[in-house]
Image (cartoon, rainbow, N blue to C red):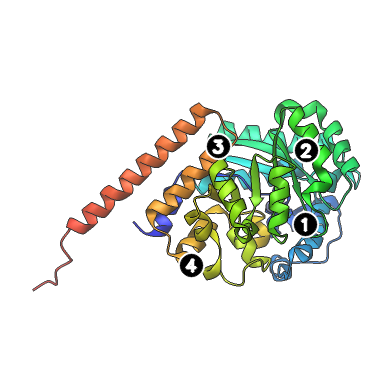
Amino acid sequence: MTPEQFIAGLPKAELHMHIEGSIEPALMLALARRNGVAIRWQTEAELRDAYRFTRLQDFLDLYYDGCRVLLQVADFHEVTRDYLRRAHADGVRHAEMFLGPQGHTMRGVPLAVVMQGVLSAMEAAEAEDGITSGLILVAQRHRSEEEAMALLAEAEPWYGRILGFGLGGAELGHPPSKFERFFARCRELGFKVTAHAGEEGPAAYVREAVELLQVDRLDHGNACLEDAALVKELSLRRIPLTVCPLSNLKLQVVTDMAVHPLKQLMDAGLCVTVNSDDPSYFGGYVNDNYLACQQALGLTQAELAQLARQSFEAAFMTEAQRAQALAAIDDWVALAEADAQVAAMSPLPQEAE
Ligand SMILES: Nc1ncnc2[nH]cnc12
Ligand SMILES: [Zn+2]
């Protein structure tokens, strides 16, 4: 079995992807046309060509601009359904998706339109493909804490349909401490909380996310490696990191996949997971991320399986769901091992005499 085949069949959870970052160029053009929204690009090739970034802010400018094509319930449904279909095809059994309502409500799209489209797609995906999913609403960190509080209040009608709240957007200059009261309120209400930290920002931001925001998971978290005491704390407390390798490459957080810190984070005993972040902008869905790491870092089947197990350990799912998913990984690993044994026993193809 090739690494591609092993990764393709490996049951996994995806815990770090932004719905708005999964609008494929073809859908972007179709929605722009359907909704009469002017965009700068005419073809898929032009769009793909525009996806060159030197830092997070370059990407965010394009990403927020791309959100303008999303206007109707059907648009939010389509982009979410498309992502969940792709994820299912990649062996994702459970996805926890980020949604950034402020990028929509601030341009006049009612939250009800956004939620109706996204939630109906999640229901359809579970009914049709059996993939389960959850929703994490992300506050934009360049906005004020009051605006994050307003988002929390506005989301109240959907509290029963939301897993948690997170923090995303421009990291540098907007430390987690800016949102301490917001996170305290989210936790008080019983929500899970995550924050992007240590993507472009320093280890101090990761520490703030853990100690001040008391996050259940860290999104990215790469920079924790700069602080050995922090790594130890994350390892002891098994605070998961949702790492996004191809995103890191595209946003020049790393210069080359060969120097990506994924393996170092694993070797430090951290509960690391692999995710796609914004798959249509960064050129890869979750399996592309697993494969890029396998190839650049020489990950073994056992290490790939460990990453998949950790994705379920880190997921906000029920224990019963988790046990089922872990058993499915064991089955797949056993099958791959049997396959390898058969391959080792079979004689080399003989030349006809
Ligand atoms: N990689 C990323 N970092 C911060 N915020 C984001 N929003 C979407 N993708 C993001
Ligand atoms: Zn992200």
**Which residue is under mark 1?**
171
Check the image and report above or below for 172 versus 152: below
Of labels 3 and 2, earlier in sequence is 3
Is residue 138 at all visible to an observer of this figure? yes
Residue type marked 2: Phe
The residue shown at (17%, 65%) is 348
Disc 4 crowd rating (10 Å Cα; few below 14, some 14-19, many 20+) is: few
Q: Residue at x 17, y 56 (%)?
A: 345
Between marks 4 and 1 in the image, the one whose residue lies nearer the viewer: 1
> Which residue is label 4 attached to?
296
Name the residue that disc number 2 marks: 183
Q: Name the mark on residue 131.
A: 3
Residue 83 position in % (x across, y down): 63, 47
| Quarter-of-image position of residue 131 | top right
Indicate yes or no: mark 1 CB to ligand 1 under 8 Å: yes
Say which of marks 3 and 4 sits in front.
4
Q: Nearer the viewer, residue 61 or 112?
A: 61
Q: Nearer the viewer, residue 144 or 12?
A: 144
Is disc 2's CB within 8 Å of ligand 1? Answer: no
Element at badge 2? helix
Q: Is residue 273 left or right of residue 333?
A: right
Closer to the chain start, of discs 2 and 4, is: 2
Residue at far front of view: 229
